[in-house]
Image (spheres, grey):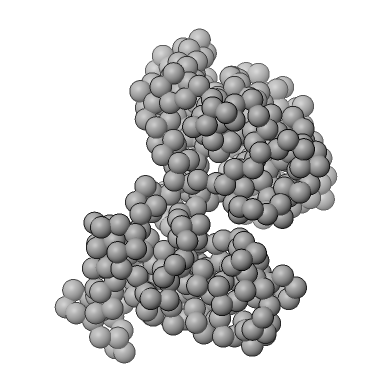
Amino acid sequence: MRTEIRPVSGLRYLFLDLNSYFASVEQQVNPRLLGKPVAVVPIANTDATCAIAASYEAKAFGVKTGMRIYEAKKLCPGLITIDARHDLYVEYHHRIMDEVQNHLPIEKERSIDEASCRLMGDECKPENARELARAIKAGIRAKVGDALRCSVGVASTVLLAKIASKLQKPDGLVLLPPEELPGPLLKLKLIDLPGIGWSMEQHLFNAGVTSIADLWALAPKQARIIWGSVAGERFWYALHGYELPEGETRRGSIGHSRMLSPRMRPPEHARIVARALLLKAAVRLRRYGDAAGALGFSARPERAPRFVADTTFSPTQDSFVLLEQLEKFWLEMIRENGRHEPLKKVSIWLHHLVPIEKRSADLFIARRPDGVSRGEALWTALDKLVTRYGRGTVAPASQHGVTLQYLGAKIAFNRVPDRVEFVE
């Protein structure tokens, strides 16, 4: 069936972007931090780590997300570093989303600090959309926290509304009516647009597209050629105010990674962290009702080249099977890098996911009549015990003593952890 591409007249989407979210939450729960330069960090007690969020007071000194703390402190000697508390940020996320729902249904939670709402009927009128945005902003301040600010963009597509939300920060409110385009966009750089990173910007430059005006003047097929996929054509239509269905997507992988503190970098300690990450991913796998047919592993040593390994197997939910595969990767890495090479980061990911009820039979794996192996049934039972009685109720002996820093859920770029992940 041919996809219908419809130009949109008027305003259709409201996009909410929470400002300096992690740092703002920390300032909300600790009033002594209000008005102070704050950086949220993933690893405590080291200036070699980086800022994963910075308050606007810190940004005024030039502190940016991703900046090393020792560099940030040169710019801002009074910088206060706070250990990230992902469970707190998720809890505030849900409180904020609940307040947004009091004003508009949420079309999609785009990330931990972003959400989009679809406007209907009279809500699409500029004066009504503006009033809704103001009500949402006031509701968040009054009912969730006065330290929490957001910028709101309103436009005809999600992409344009997201761009609008970034035009005025902090605490902004910008409407981009279709009849005004591309005017307000022309002052932006290509890399300012969501979805255009450094690499894509270089592709555009190489194609002779060096400004928003050049990008706007392209034909849809030209954008498709430059992007090398239909994504370019979809981007062009969204930028020009055409609404395309987003299409259903299915989870492609489940992964976790951790930067390691100096204390956890010796291989014997890093191995325990990697196992903990794999066990946590396996819990999510079972909760989603999927089986994984492949495991990937990556380790970033301090001095040696990055180690990456991947393998496929019969789709499984059994943590023992997955741990056995991880151990093979670990021994291979040790043979390459040596037993004493410190590791800065470890990552694991489960992929080739398939719904448990749709996986094929395997002659070499004994399964019960319901299609589940004894190992999978055992781990499912253990998951239920942990859910009922809390983390630490039961776990492999090798994982005893692993701290919450490595067991706790973390917030990824565009995925909000479920509340249950902080107790699994």
Q: Residue, x 68% and y 78% (percent of image)?
A: 341
Q: Position of residue 381 (x, y in %)?
A: 23, 68
- Name of the residue lying farthest toward the left: 369
Q: Position of residue 190 (x, y in %)?
A: 74, 38
Quarter holding residue 363: bottom left
Looking at the image, can residue 200 be seen?
no
Front in this rendered view, residue 276 or 113: 276
Q: Please, is residue 306 above or below residue 67 in the view?
A: below
Q: Residue, x 25% and y 86% (percent of image)?
A: 366
Quarter holding residue 107: top left
Quarter holding residue 167: top right
Q: Position of residue 70 (x, y in %)?
A: 76, 49
Q: Please, is residue 64 above or below residue 324 in the view?
A: above
Q: Please, is residue 202 above or below residue 375 in the view?
A: above
Q: Position of residue 126 (x, y in %)?
A: 52, 13
Front in this rendered view, residue 293 or 240: 293
- Name of the residue lying farthest toward the top: 127
Q: Residue, x 50% and y 57% (percent of image)?
A: 405
Q: Residue, x 78% and y 46% (percent of image)?
A: 71
